[in-house]
């Protein structure tokens, strides 16, 4: 999984408190905190993978604070808007894992927007 782990970095696999693997598994990402998600069908939280390899669940109060400063809906029914992950990453001076961002975006469109991109109806 991890090819080489820098000194002082906890080696993976990187797991949530529910013992579910996170999308982020590469030590190359450890230049700054990485916002990521569980590789799972239903989400109960957002995670930060720190440069030392430690995993932190994001405080729901912080998520609510970010939501209150936004003009749109950023989470609902076990889904998170990609904008929420980007705003969280900016707040912690981090980055969003690219795979997590793609999956979050896809699920938001499929499950919250019912597949409607506002083009010409639903995606078949």
Image (cartoon, rainbow, N blue to C red):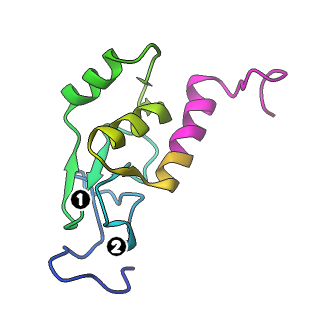
Q: What label sits on residue 65 in the rendered view?
A: none
Would you say residue 76 is visible in this rendering? no
Q: Residue at x 34, y 21 (%)?
A: 67
Extreme right residue here? Answer: 120
Give how far across and how far down residue 38 sits, in percent.
37, 51
> Where's the C terminus, which quadrant?
top right
Residue 3 vertical position relative to residue 51 in the rendered view, above or below: below
Residue 9 vertical position relative to residue 42 in the rendered view, above or below: below
Give how far across and how far down residue 20 sits, in percent.
32, 56
- Direction from residue 18 to residue 24 in the image, left or right: right
Assign a secondary structure to mark 2: helix
Q: Residue at x 28, y 28 (%)?
A: 63
- The residue closer to the viewer here, 115 or 31, is 31
Residue 74 vertical position relative to residue 38 in the rendered view, above or below: above
- The residue closer to the viewer here, 14 or 85, is 85
Q: Earlier in the sequence, mark 1 or mark 2?
A: 2
Instruction: Give neighbour class at mark 2: few <14, some 14-19, many 20+ (Cα, 10 Å).
Output: many
Residue 109 vertical position relative to residue 6 in the rendered view, above or below: above
> Where's the N terminus, which quadrant?
bottom left
Assign a secondary structure to mark 1: loop
Q: What label sits on residue 27 in the rendered view?
A: 2
The reply to whether the C-beta atoms of the residues labelled 1 and 2 are less than 8 Å apart is: no
User: Which residue is denoted by mark 1 in the rendering?
Assistant: 50
In the picture, residue 110 is in which quadrant?
A: top right
Give how far across and how far down residue 44 sits, in percent.
32, 37
Q: Which residues are magenta?
A: 103-123
Q: Residue at x 22, y 45 (%)?
A: 57
Q: Is residue 52 magenta?
A: no
Give how far across and how far down residue 87 sits, in percent.
38, 34
Q: Is residue 111 magenta?
A: yes
Instruction: Give neighbour class at mark 1: few <14, some 14-19, many 20+ (Cα, 10 Å).
Output: some
In the picture, residue 51 is in which quadrant?
A: bottom left
């Amino acid at each position: 999984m991890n090819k080489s782990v820098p000194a002082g970095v906890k080696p993976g696999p990187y797991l949530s408190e529910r013992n579910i693997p996170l999308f982020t598994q590469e030590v190359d990402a450890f230049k700054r905190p990485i916002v990521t998600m569980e590789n799972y069908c239903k989400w109960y939280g957002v995670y930060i993978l720190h440069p030392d390899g430690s995993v932190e669940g994001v405080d729901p109060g912080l998520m609510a604070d970010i939501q209150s400063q936004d003009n749109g809906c950023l989470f609902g029914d076990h889904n998170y808007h990609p904008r929420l992950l980007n705003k969280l990453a900016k707040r912690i001076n981090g980055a969003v894992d690219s795979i997590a961002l793609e999956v979050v975006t896809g699920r938001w469109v499929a499950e919250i927007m019912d597949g409607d991109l506002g083009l010409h109806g639903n995606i078949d």
